[in-house]
Image: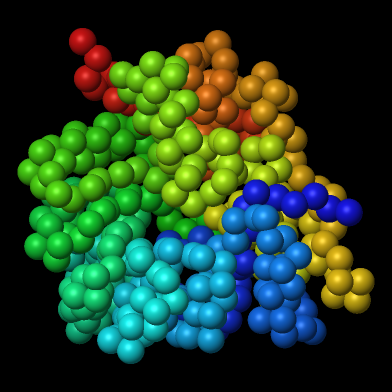
């Protein structure tokens, strides 16, 4: 019998997204669909793995109202949206389903929004209006902003806009060579860009103290100035936002499944669905059975001694706590550079080391 993981994301469920963003990672290859009702399969998973933390993850929440009862059933508090369809009816239904936070992808101006998400000026204004509407319905609003070398100079503009919209939080994600983003490699960030970003973010924290600014794990964790005990406490706090894992990356220790109810494929990272290496198992429709038979070696003890580069134990005092940050991010950028054994590569860019080089006296 397959053991119960700490975290299961139910992926590719429901209707498709109403737009196709240029940087979207949420792309699954070889869509040979299961001959099974997705809702029935999702309910089976929820019932069978009742001790796991379940996240219902359609590509766009607002055009999947039939999933709201499932969201309520698993106690999910956060959903993701591109912001276009968030009308009053949808927002009321989400609120009744127990949702407290809506994460909306937004760029600083119409030009960037059009380049990345394909929205026209009218749609951009509608997204801004729907953010205001979400606040009126008393949701916590987090803006997801994908950073590349094309838009890092508009961070100040984005922060000012979000401040005016009364957004609660901006989470900066890193453009990665994944999904549709495989065609955007010329816009990927380097370490010099990251340091520039850090300076802008820290300045905006002072300007807008009520606007919480954070970096997604794709940048690596920031343990700058923290003791090992403080760093360990930060990992525990960060993981509690979404996962039950004891590690920053829930795939460490085999504690994560991303299960696509369209194909039955199971992945160790939802960010890397279009990478062959990320498939770790599958759901057998006929046998009604999940098999996990290809999970990579991400066991904590082994990983600690196999990590290379920035994340090697000899190069980082936080290695035992961090265990290499985001494993799929490290893998992807190491693969892009042609490194051998990219699975155990260190993060190419370390937020902690960037902070140290900028602020350490």
Identify the residue at image location x=40%, y=69%.
Answer: 99
Q: Is residue 218 left or right of residue 261?
A: left
Position of 229 with respect to 328 (left or right) is: left
Give the percent coordinates (x, y) of residue 50. Answer: 68, 61
> Which quadrant is home to the N terminus?
bottom right
Image x and y of residue 330, in percent? 55, 37
- Give the percent coordinates (x, y) of residue 28: 63, 67
The image quadrant where one finds the C terminus is: top left
Report if residue 12 is visible in the image: yes
The residue lying furthest to the bottom in this view is 89
Q: Quadrant of residue 300?
A: top right
Outermost residue, right direction?
Answer: 287
In x, y percent, where is residue 82?
Answer: 36, 73
Q: Residue at x 55, y 30 (%)?
A: 324
Residue pictured at 19% horizontal, 75% vertical: 136
For this rendering, which residue is in front, 231 or 217?
231
Residue lying at 24% horizontally and 22% vertically, measured from the top left: 358
């Amino acid at each position: 019998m397959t053991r119960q993981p700490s975290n299961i994301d139910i992926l590719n469920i429901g209707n498709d997204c109403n737009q196709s963003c240029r940087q979207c990672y949420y792309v699954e290859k070889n869509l040979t669909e299961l001959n099974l009702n997705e809702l029935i399969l999702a309910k089976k998973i929820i019932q069978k793995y009742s001790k796991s933390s379940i996240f219902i993850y359609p590509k766009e929440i607002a055009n999947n109202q039939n999933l709201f009862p499932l969201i309520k059933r698993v106690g999910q508090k956060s959903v993701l949206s591109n912001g276009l369809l968030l009308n009053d009816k949808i927002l009321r239904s989400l609120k009744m389903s127990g949702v407290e936070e809506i994460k909306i992808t937004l760029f600083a101006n119409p030009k960037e929004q059009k380049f990345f998400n394909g929205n026209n000026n009218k749609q951009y204004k509608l997204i801004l209006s729907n953010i205001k509407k979400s606040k009126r319905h008393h949701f916590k609003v987090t803006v997801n902003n994908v950073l590349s070398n094309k838009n890092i100079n508009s961070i100040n503009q984005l922060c000012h806009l979000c401040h005016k919209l009364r957004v609660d939080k901006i989470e900066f994600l890193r453009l990665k060579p994944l999904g549709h983003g495989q065609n955007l490699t010329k816009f990927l960030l380097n370490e010099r860009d990251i340091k520039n970003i850090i300076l802008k973010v820290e300045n905006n924290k002072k300007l807008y103290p009520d606007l919480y600014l954070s970096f997604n794990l794709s940048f690596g964790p920031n343990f700058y100035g923290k003791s090992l005990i403080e760093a360990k406490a930060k990992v525990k706090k960060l993981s509690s936002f979404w996962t039950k894992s004891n590690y920053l990356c829930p795939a460490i220790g085999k504690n994560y499944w991303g299960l696509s109810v369209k194909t039955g494929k199971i992945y160790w990272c939802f960010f890397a669905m279009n990478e062959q290496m990320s498939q770790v198992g599958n759901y057998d429709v006929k046998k009604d059975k999940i098999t996990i038979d290809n999970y990579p070696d991400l066991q904590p003890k082994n990983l600690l001694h196999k990590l290379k580069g920035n994340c090697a134990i000899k190069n980082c005092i936080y290695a035992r706590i961090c265990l290499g940050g985001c494993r799929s991010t490290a893998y992807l950028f190491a693969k892009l550079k042609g490194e051998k054994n990219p699975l155990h590569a260190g993060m190419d860019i370390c937020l902690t080391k960037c902070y140290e080089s900028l602020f350490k006296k």
